[in-house]
Image (tube, rainbow, N blue to C red):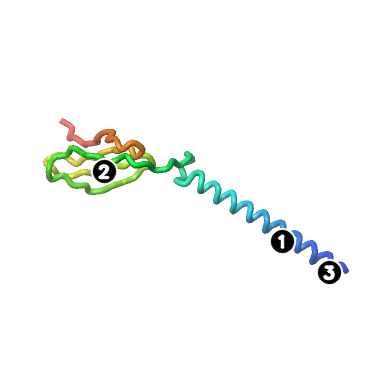
Amino acid sequence: MPHDRTLRTVKILVTVMTVVILMGLGFVAYGLLVRGDGSGERTETARSFGTVVLDQPAGTRIADVTGTGHHMLLHLEGGEQRERIAVIDLSSGRVLGFITVAPVP
């Protein structure tokens, strides 16, 4: 009979541990859904903002694109201008500004 009691205890422990693991996985899944980008902020549904026009001279090309959460950074080259970075707000589609590096006089 002591063997039956030990086996029953082990079965109960395995069942409880399984429930705890499943609850933990549920909390992890919920956390990923709520904070999908890992920033701790609630994610918003993307909405369309139409067409964004960058007024740049002819010959300008997009060398690189980087997303930084709520902003998009476009690395622009050419067009007889210095290299520059255009900062675009993804929620409104508005061009926030440009970053350039100028030589020190």
**Mark 2 and mark 1 residues within 8 Å of each other at the beta carbon:** no
Q: Name the residue under label 3.
A: 3
Mark closest to the chain's N terminus, 3 or 2: 3
Disc 2 designates what residue? 74
Q: Position of residue 102 (x, y in %)?
A: 18, 35
Q: Is mark 2 on a helix, strand or loop?
A: strand
- What residue is shown at x 11% (from left), y 41% (from top)? 80
The front one of 80 and 27 is 27
Mark 3: few/some/many CA within 10 Å (<14, 14-19, 20+): few
Mark toward the viewer: 3 or 2: 2
Q: Which residue is pictured at 68% across the width and 56% down the height?
A: 19
The kind of residue tagged 3 is His
Q: Which of marks 2 and 1 is nearer the N terminus?
A: 1
Left/right placement of residue 57 relative to residue 62 reads left
Q: Name the kind of residue labelled 1 in the image.
A: Val
Q: Is residue 24 left or right of residue 6?
A: left
Vertical order, 33 against 102 (above or below): below
Query: In terms of depth relative to the viewer, which is nearer, 77 or 31?
Result: 31
Q: Which mark is residue 63?
A: none
Q: In this view, does 28 lie above or below 52?
A: below
The quadrant holding residue 47 is: top left
Along the line of sight, the residue nearer the viewer: 84 or 28: 28
Circle 3 or circle 1, nearest the eye: 1
For disc 1, the marked residue is 14
Which is nearer the N-term, disc 3 or disc 1? 3
Residue 43: percent from left, percent from top: 45, 42
Residue at the (34%, 42%) spot, across then down: 48
Q: Where is residue 96 in the image (x, y as percent from the top left)?
A: 28, 33
In the image, residue 34 sits, relative to residue 17, either above or below, namely above
**Distance from Cα at disc 2 to Cα at disc 1:** 54 Å
| Label 2 crowd bin: few (<14), some (14–19), many (20+), radius 10 Å | some
